[in-house]
Image (tube, helix red, strand yellow):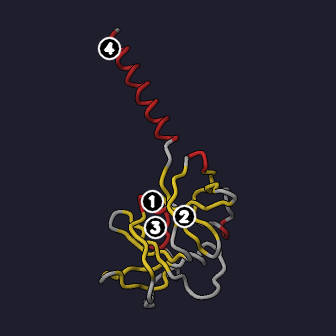
């Protein structure tokens, strides 16, 4: 009987810990692309740098603008505006956010230096199903921000998308 009570107590403790983790704020990086807001889990963000120049590379997927020099490291640079159906106007973005998962990393062009914020899980809304021609496989949800919305970019899906496009 004492063994069963111990197991029940353990299960209740694990469930309480899971419930607490589900309401714990998550740190995110808010990005701006063509006056639209996007959100990336901060755990994937390595750094932000000012892009001085981008060297085009023939034969790379169209989402890649080329490569940039980041302290001696050749960094692939992606411009997500066309993939997200956003207008491409004016000069190229001045900053890149380096996102990384495992050994994969890429610089994503952004219009402004990003903002870091804590968000609660209840501030997320699941992204509505999109038609195949408008689908963005790496946008998986919406974040309700003060007076605006931000699309949640899933980094593993983004890296997979960039690696598979032409």
Left or right of residue 132: residue 96: left
Q: Residue furthest left?
A: 72
Q: Look at the numbered discs 2 and 1 and tell me whether their residues touch, using CB distance below 8 Å.
A: no
Which residue occupies 61% across, 49% down? 123
Mark earlier in primary sequence (4, 3):
4
Residue at image mark 1 = 42
Kindly identify the residue that appears in the image at 52 percent across and 65 percent down: 115
- Is disc 4 placed on a helix, strand or loop? helix
Dot 4 crowding, Cα within 10 Å, few <14, some 14–19, many 20+: few
Secondary structure type for disc 1:
helix
What residue is pinned by disc 4? 3
Q: Circle 3 sits on which residue? A: 160
Q: Quadrant of residue 142?
A: bottom right
CA distance separating discs 2 and 1: 9 Å
Camera-near label (1 vs 4) is 1
- Figure check: 26 above or below 53: above
Q: Nearer the viewer, residue 76 or 30?
A: 30
User: Which mark lies nearer to you, 3 or 1?
Assistant: 1
* Residue 50 visible in rendering: yes
Q: Is residue 85 above or below residue 127?
A: below
Residue 88 position in % (x across, y down)? 63, 83
Q: Nearer the viewer, mark 4 or mark 3?
A: 4
Assign a secondary structure to mark 2. Answer: strand
| Residue at image location 41% in from the left, 58% down from the top | 43
Please state which of residues 159 and 26 is positioned toward the viewer in this rendering: 26
The CA span between labels 1 and 4 is 42 Å
């Amino acid at each position: 009987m004492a063994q069963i009570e111990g197991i029940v107590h353990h299960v209740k403790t694990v469930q309480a810990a899971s419930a607490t983790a589900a309401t714990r704020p998550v740190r995110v990086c808010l990005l701006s692309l063509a006056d639209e807001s996007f959100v990336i889990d901060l755990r994937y963000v390595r750094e932000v740098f000012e892009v001085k120049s981008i060297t085009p590379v023939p034969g790379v997927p169209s989402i890649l603008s080329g490569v940039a020099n980041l302290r001696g490291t050749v960094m692939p640079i992606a411009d997500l505006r066309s993939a997200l159906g956003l207008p491409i106007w004016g000069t190229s973005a001045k900053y890149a956010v380096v996102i990384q998962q495992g050994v994969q990393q890429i610089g994503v062009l952004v219009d402004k230096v990003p903002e870091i914020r804590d968000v609660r899980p209840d501030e997320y809304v699941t992204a509505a199903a999109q038609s195949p021609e408008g689908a963005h496989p790496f946008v998986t949800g919406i974040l309700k921000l003060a007076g605006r919305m931000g699309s949640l970019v899933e980094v593993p899906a983004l890296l997979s998308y960039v690696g598979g496009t032409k």
